[in-house]
Amino acid sequence: MFTLIDLPYALTALEGVISAQTLSFHHGKHLQTYVNNLNKLLPGSPYEGLSLEEIVKKADGAIFNNAGQVLNHNLYFTQFKAPREGDTPSGPLAEQINRQFGSFEAFQEEFAAKGAGLFGSGWVWLSAQADGTLVITQETNAGNPLTKGLKPLLTFDVWEHAYYLDWQNRRPDYLKALWSLIDWNEVEKRYGR
């Protein structure tokens, strides 16, 4: 049985970008519902006893949708810290971003443009291929780069429930503000695994 992850920060820690009200609904209600649904669907299925990652790689239909949303949200919520402007990645991840995109700012622009340009609901991801090459993808609904053989590193949730209470229909502004929340130490750990 899967359980709702604990947030590694207080509900008020992301204020100014993600309000405590949004976080309470998004984590405590939306994500809890996906966890509950997944736990109801798994008993007796071929995916019972597998990790979230294995389920997402192998499942389809309702089990995939709920497992994908649990995994996606777990990665989303655990990549944040209290807002602080100007943080950037370092080490091998920063070197790869600069090599591929020319600069961190150019990477941010491309990533945000893909998030703003995704029609409907979904996720924009920074992922790594086995050789360390970085890829930005748009995934609709519960999509996750694992299904393409990629290692997910960073994601911005562009489902409206992730931002509408705080940003209304201003998705580009929400995406721009999220950069101040990123815990680059966590993203770098994911890249190094």
Image (cartoon, rainbow, N blue to C red):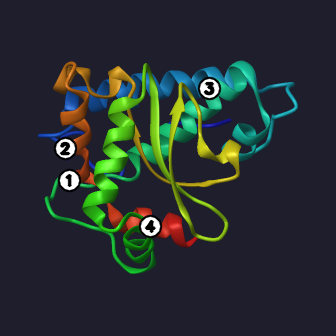
Of callouts 4 and 2, which one flags the residue occurring earlier in the amino acid sequence? 4
Q: Would residue 149 be seen by someone viewing this image from the given angle?
A: yes
Of callouts 4 and 1, which one flags the residue occurring earlier in the amino acid sequence? 4
On the image, numbered disc 1 is attached to which residue? 180
Residue at position x 79%, y 38% in the image: 58
Kindly indicate whether the residue at mark 2 contacts the one at mark 1 (C-beta within 8 angstroms): yes
Name which residue type carries label 2. Answer: Ala
Asked if residue 97 lies left or right of residue 144, the reply is: left
The span from disc 3 to disc 2 (Cα, nearest Å) is 27 Å
Q: Position of residue 185 (x, y in %)?
A: 37, 68
SS type, badge 1: helix
Q: Report the disc number at residue 13.
A: none
On the image, numbered disc 4 is attached to which residue? 100
Given this view, does label 4 or label 2 mark the residue nearer the observer? 4
Q: Position of residue 77 (x, y in %)?
A: 39, 44
The span from disc 4 to disc 2 (Cα, nearest Å) is 23 Å
Name which residue type carries label 4. Answer: Gln
SS type, badge 4: helix
Residue at position x 19%, y 25% in the image: 170
Kindly indicate whether the residue at mark 2 contacts the one at mark 4 (C-beta within 8 angstroms): no
The span from disc 1 to disc 3 (Cα, nearest Å) is 29 Å
Q: Report the disc number at residue 66.
A: 3
The span from disc 1 to disc 2 (Cα, nearest Å) is 6 Å
Given this view, does label 4 or label 1 mark the residue nearer the observer? 4
Q: Report the disc number at residue 177.
A: 2
SS type, badge 3: helix
